[in-house]
Image (cartoon, rainbow, N blue to C red):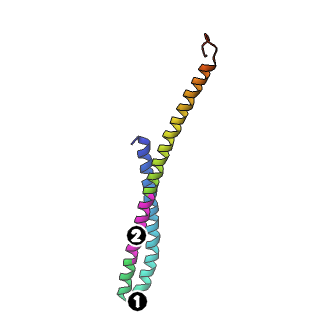
């Protein structure tokens, strides 16, 4: 893995972690409001149920982030394969151009 790939990985991980933290923060804020309401109006079991739901949400968020990470890594791999293919095609085109231009030159003259 080269330096560019490693820096892209680091950047992708930082972006995904930022999204994860924002989602967790958003869920936590709505949860704190619910906890306040439950503590003043409902039994303790509602709070436990909410806590279980919160853990489930976090697990889903973590799963979604993992899926995004794997998709981004797969896309980068495909981009690298495509770049190699395009570079190979470019080299082949250049080789063919040189071959054609060499065949079209009159004998005894050099290509400048």
77, 23: nearer the viewer = 77
Which residue is at 40% across, 89% downward?
Answer: 42
- Say few, some or many: other residues with alpha carbon within 10 Å of mark 2 (under 14 / 14 to 19 / 20 or more): some
Toward the top, the furthest residue is 108
Q: Picture quarter containing residue 64?
A: bottom left
The local crowd at label 1, few if under 14, some if 14 to 19, many if 20 or more residues have their Cα within 10 Å, is few
Secondary structure type for disc 1: loop
Foreground of the two, 80 or 4: 80
For the point 53% across and 39% down, the residue is 86
Q: Quadrant of the C terminus?
A: top right
Q: Name the residue carrying label 1.
A: 42
Measured along the vertical axis of the image, is residue 56 above or below residue 81? Answer: below
Residue 19 position within the rendered picture, expressed as x and y whole percent measured from the top left? 47, 61
Residue at 43%, 67% in the rendered image? 61
Which residue occupies the foreground of this view, 81 or 10?
A: 81
Q: Give percent across and percent down for residue 1.
A: 39, 42
Q: Return the x and y of residue 23 as percentages of the image width and height.
A: 46, 67
The kind of secondary structure the magenta stretch mainly shows is: helix
Question: In the rendered image of this protein, does residue 16 appear above or below residue 43?
Answer: above
Give the number of callouts.
2
Q: Secondary structure at mark 2?
A: helix
- Distance Cα–Cα, label 1 vs label 2: 24 Å
Give the labeled residue for mark 2: 58
Residue 16: quadrant of the picture: bottom left
Q: Residue at x 38, y 82 (%)?
A: 49
Q: Earlier in the sequence, mark 1 or mark 2?
A: 1
Q: Which residues are magenta?
A: 53-68
Q: Position of residue 80 (x, y in %)?
A: 47, 44
Q: Is residue 29 positioned above or below 73 on the image? A: below
Residue 54 on the magenta span: yes
In the figure, is residue 98 to the left or right of 59?
right
- Magenta stretch contains residue 46: no
């Amino acid at each position: 893995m080269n330096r560019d790939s490693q820096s892209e990985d680091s950047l992708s991980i930082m972006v995904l972690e930022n999204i994860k933290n924002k989602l967790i923060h958003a869920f936590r804020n709505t949860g704190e409001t619910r906890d306040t309401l439950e503590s003043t109006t409902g039994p303790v079991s509602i709070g436990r149920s909410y806590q279980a739901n919160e853990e489930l949400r976090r697990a889903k968020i973590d799963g979604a982030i993992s899926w995004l990470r794997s998709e981004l890594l797969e896309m980068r791999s495909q981009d690298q394969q495509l770049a190699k293919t395009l570079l190979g095609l470019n080299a082949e085109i250049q080789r063919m151009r040189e071959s054609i231009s060499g065949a079209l030159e009159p004998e005894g003259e050099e290509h400048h």
